[in-house]
Amino acid sequence: MSHSVTIRTQTVTSGSSAIIVNTSYLKTWSGVLKLLQLALGIVCIGIVGHTINKYRYWTSEEFFFLLMATTFMIGTFILLVSCLASLSTATVISKTIYDLLYHAFAFALLLAASLTLTVHASNYKRTSVYELLLAASICGLINVAAYLLSTIIAVRTYRGI
């Protein structure tokens, strides 16, 4: 017995220019930590930048701290935007060695810069600059803790633990 079969195909195209934002990434620990790192980086740069411009000349300790805080704030901003702009980027980047190395280097260098600034701030006791430099170094140390947590998460994700 023979019979005929009709197959219809339909192609649907979408012309939407909507921008999709992966807001679910901000509900993960990695997303929350990156947002926290970005905010603390902005605060650190603002405090040290204000201190340097308003009160006196630059010192190498303040410049090192400002350089490290700016470097890793920009890097974290780029990582955060890329994870928010693409649905698959967050899962792909977290499984690469780049994420692990980035957070490990950020932890180490920002720790060195924050401790250096803390020791340097003790030279300015009894001045108005002391409190500002100490506040910036404390924000830097909190940021270091956030980068340490991100490094631990990156190690677990990279190894598949």
Image: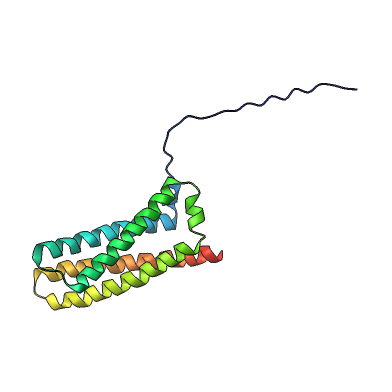
Residue 119 picture location, percent across and down: 21, 78
Q: Quadrant of the N terminus?
A: top right
Could you tell me if residue 38 is visible in this image?
A: yes
Q: Residue at x 25, y 69 (%)?
A: 65
Residue 161 picture location, percent across and down: 56, 65
How many callouts does the rendering have? Answer: 0
Q: Residue at x 11, y 68 (%)?
A: 57
Q: In which quarter of the view is residue 126 placed?
A: bottom left
Locate residue 62 relative to residue 72 in the image: left or right: left
Could you tell me if residue 161 is visible in this image?
A: no
Residue 41 picture location, percent across and down: 28, 60
Locate residue 146 relative to residue 136 in the image: left or right: right
Q: Residue at x 31, y 62 (%)?
A: 71
Q: How is the image coloured?
A: rainbow
Q: In which quarter of the view is residue 35 placed?
A: bottom left
Q: Residue at x 42, y 48 (%)?
A: 84
Q: In which quarter of the view is residue 55 placed?
A: bottom left
Locate residue 157 relative to residue 105 in the image: left or right: right
Residue 150 picture location, percent across and down: 42, 64
